[in-house]
Structure formats: structure tokens, C-alpha cells
Amino acid sequence: MPLNGKHQKTKYIFVTGGVTSSLGKGIIASSLAKLLQSRGLSVTIQKLDPYLNVDPGTLNPYEHGECYVTDDGAETDLDLGHYERFLNVPTSQANNVTTGRIYYNVLSKERKGDFLGKTVQVIPHITDEIKRNILQLGKSGKFDIVITEIGGCVGDIESLPFLEAVRQLKWELGEKNMLTVHLTLVPYLKSAGELKTKPTQHSVKQLQMSGIQPDIIVCRTEHPLPGDIRKKIALFCNVEVQSVIEAMDAKTIYEVPLLMKKEKLDQRALYMMDIYNDKDSDMKKWEEFLYKFKHPESEVRIGLIGKYVELRDAYKSIAEAFIHGGAVNKTKVKIEWIHSESMVAEAVEEKLKDLDGVLVAPGFGERGIEGKIAAVKYVRENNIPFLGICLGMQMAVIEYARNVLGWENAHSTEMEKTTEYPVIDLMADQQNIENKGGTMRLGAYNCKLSEKSLAKKIYGKSKISERHRHRWEFNNKYRTDFEKAGLFIGGTNPENDLVEIIEIPKNRFFIGVQYHPELKSTVLQPHPLFVSFVKASLDYKNSKK
């Protein structure tokens, strides 16, 4: 879609950060994108990560939080989850590029002889590959504006090639076709009673040393920026006062787009890129969602049982999906973070008896498995609403085999290769795979829902598409045994008959899914499974009164 119906080039916005990590570049990028989208522009966001891993797929969640998965099977940074939740537009492999991927591509070309014997160097070969990846989305013709978030901090050695590529693009694209937004910190020193601009000045100076002059400076702060502070930053950082944007700490990330609208960040960006847009940003639906979220009429306590709960970003999309599902039900979802290793026999009832619902989270490896199985047993027997995701669904299968079918040794071959009853087994196409990165069953796959299933009632249709990330599956060898024992198969893959959904019809809400529904939940399209799970948890809570 060309800008305003006219044939113009795609515009590019780069978001950099300084002073410290975790300032929220992804949220600022997402908020700006949302405001521009609400004006009728077609926008996408990509993330350039400076680490040498080819993708986050092999990273421990403690290292990097959750690994987000796109429809086309890319394993990406968790910031892409923010992009999708804000924009309600799917991302792809092209939306996340690491230094490792850049070097991998360049070295693959070198091995093929594509450089005709020339010496391969950071400049121009690495920077050219970075630019190619940045421009790739724009050349698709789908987007008016491409926003690129540069990971890490200005001054990091790892980020230098990315910044050099951005510097080069300024002259290749033309001044009005590109914009640099720099996110920085303006700390408040309590002892002095002052906001301090020096960290921002040094951060901008570091960016200028890379040959990049920021066009807009967004200042993270705990206190409002008075006019004299804005003028000081503008003076020392070589920008106009209108280009100094206040980004006050917010109670929720979903307030940030409205704060940026108030600061006129989108207007400033459009003006500086010479884009004429006479539409005001329409954030009505967003405001309705935010009102429901901030003014709940009830509350439920849902236990999230996982093995990485010390770092809650490991389950970021699940936590956000609960916010979306809670808002629909005008209900605050209070997540009780429970480590699966803490679920020893004597602690299960104590930890779970007062909860309104339990979600057993995805994961890999043997650690904490018995705790998850014990939790499933308790909620199944006590008819507490249950949702199992990926490994959580597999643990529900194992628990049912052990305690209903009577197969005490039932297990997954992921944890016990010689188990007598391998009710969860390695997928056939995964048998001879040695490399770990990017080789799982990844991305969107179809699922046909059983006509009498609770899942069909929840989704309101017979065919769905959901994202996957797994190697092990329900073993169809035992399917008949499970069905005779009362476990209902709620959905299967139409191509290979893989079991995607299990249900226990006699329970008020007991669903396990092999896929990851949390990855498709957005502000404007909350995932129906989470909406229904929160509703079931609320109904259960009310039934106990």
C-alpha cells in the first residue's frame, strides 16, 4: 500500500538505545508503529540482535527469555511477540536477524565463491548483508514504513556493524526517507533532587561517534521532564526541542502508545520524514481494552507451573495472553508462579487447593517433570480448570496413562528412552536429526477439530491453524486405549493425524494442546483458549462461594 495512495518509497525508522539495556526499545518501537498504523499506514517492525547465535532457538530461557515462533517457522527474539501483540500483524523470518545469521550468510557465500576471490571484510561485506536484510521488508512492497530495532546498547562492540550499516543507509536512502530514534535514560538522583541529563548527553555523543545523529530522543524517566531539561537535552544533543520526547514509567506496557500519542511522537516522525497524513490516530479500541484491563470487576488466581519461573520473561507470551483474556472477561488474572521442582507430593495440595485454575507450561528436559505430572493429577481429580501447553499437554497424557490406565511406567522417550509405555514419543521425521537449531517441528500447522469437542465450541469453527515448537508427540499406538479410558481427542493434524488436542469431557475445563496458543494472542484478537480458560476459572471460583 503506497503512502496516502501515492507511489512513494518505503520509509525506514531505526530505534537505538543507550546508557543501559532493558529501557524498552521494543515497546517504544511497537508503540510508534501502533500509532502510525492507527493513522492508516502499513507498518512492520524488525529486530537486529547483536549476539552470535544464529537464532534464539538453542538459547536457554534463563539466558534470553522465551523463544518466540512465527507462522513461517522462525525462532526469534521475544520482542517480536510485542510487535505482533501491538500491531496484530504476523511477523516472519525477515523480522529477526542476528549477527550470527549475518556472518553465516556471508561465510556461506564465501564458501560458494560468490565473492570471486575477494578478501571478505566487515566493511563492505558484513554491512552490505545487514543492509540487505534491513531493506528486504521494504522491497516486498507491503509496507509504508519499516521500523528496525537495534539490539544492545550504543557503544557495545557487538553493535558496531549494525550502526555502521545505519550510517551508510542515511546517505543511500536519502535524509527524508530515514529516521533515527534514540532511547536513553534521564535518571533522578534523590539525594540531589534533580533529573540528570549527562547520561543522555554521553549516550548521544557515543552514537554521534558512530556517524549517526539522532533525529528524535526518547527519554525514559521516573519524573516529568520540565521544559528547561528538554531544552538542555536539545541544546547539547543537537536536536530540536520538539524532538525530545518524554517516556514516563507506566504501570503497564499497554499505556505506552497512549503516552507516546500525548507526546506527539508519531506526528514528529511523520513531519521529519516528510509524510503528509491528515488522519488522526484512531486508538478507540485500544483505549477500550486498556479500560477493561485497568478496571476489572473480578479476580482469579491461576497457577503457572513451569521450570523457568525465576525469569518470568521465559513465559512472556503466556503472561500477556492472560492479560488479553482477562480483559475480555473484565477479570484481573493474578498469576501464581510455581516452580515445578517444588511440587513434591506433600506440597501439591497446599500449593494448588486455593487456585481457580492451573496452567502447566511448555519446556524441555527432565528437570521438574514429576512435579508437573503431580500437579496435573491433582487438578484432574479435583476438577480444577486446566490448560496444558506443549509439554504441559504431554504431561497430562503421561499422568492419565499412569493413574487412569494403570501404566505406572508410562513416560516420554524424551526423559526415559526405554520406558515400557512410550505414550509420548519422538516424531518420525525427527529420528535422525543431530543439529538442534531450527530443526524442530516449527511454525503454523493446521488442526481439524472434532465436532463434539470443547475446542470446537471455543474456537467456533472446525479448522484452525496454530504455531508449534516441539520434537515429541502423542504416540498414536496407544490412542484407542486412551479413548476407551475416557480421554477425548479434540483435534488432529489433517495431514499426518498427529494428536493436537486432548480433553476430559467430564471435567469442567480440561484441555491440553500440543501447539502454543499464546503466540497468537494480541490486544485486538485475544486467543479464544485463554478467554475461555479465564472464564472457566472465574466460574469455578464463583461456584466455591
Image (spheres, grey):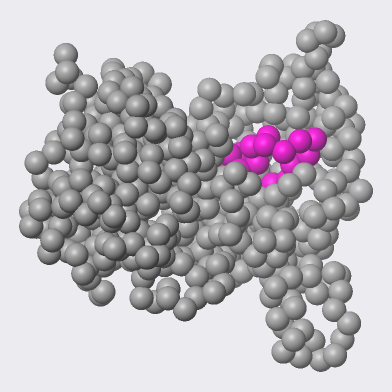
In this rendering, does residue 204 appear at all?
yes
Residue 433 position in % (x across, y down): 49, 76
Residue 203 position in % (x across, y down): 84, 38
Q: Is residue 530 above or below residue 5?
A: above
Residue 390 position in % (x across, y down): 36, 53
Q: How many marks?
A: 0
Q: What residue do we see at 26% from left, 47% from top?
A: 399
* Residue placed most toward the observer, 494 or 43: 494
Q: What residue do we see at 85% from left, 46% from top?
A: 155
Is 304 on the left or on the right of 233, as rendered?
left
Q: What residue do we see at 89% from left, 82% from top?
A: 119
Q: Is residue 17 magenta?
A: yes
Is 376 on the left or on the right of 63, as rendered?
left
* Residue placed most toward the observer, 80 or 504: 504
Q: Is residue 73 above or below residue 186?
A: below
Q: Quadrant of residue 55?
A: bottom right
* Residue placed most toward the observer, 312 or 351: 351
Residue 44 position in % (x across, y down): 54, 55
Is 183 on the left or on the right of 541, as rendered?
right
Q: Which residues are magenta?
A: 13-33
Q: What residue do we see at 80% from left, 35% from top?
A: 19
* Residue placed most toward the observer, 11 or 530: 530
Q: Is residue 44 magenta?
A: no
Is 411 on the left or on the right of 454, as rendered?
right
In this rendering, does residue 456 appear at all?
no
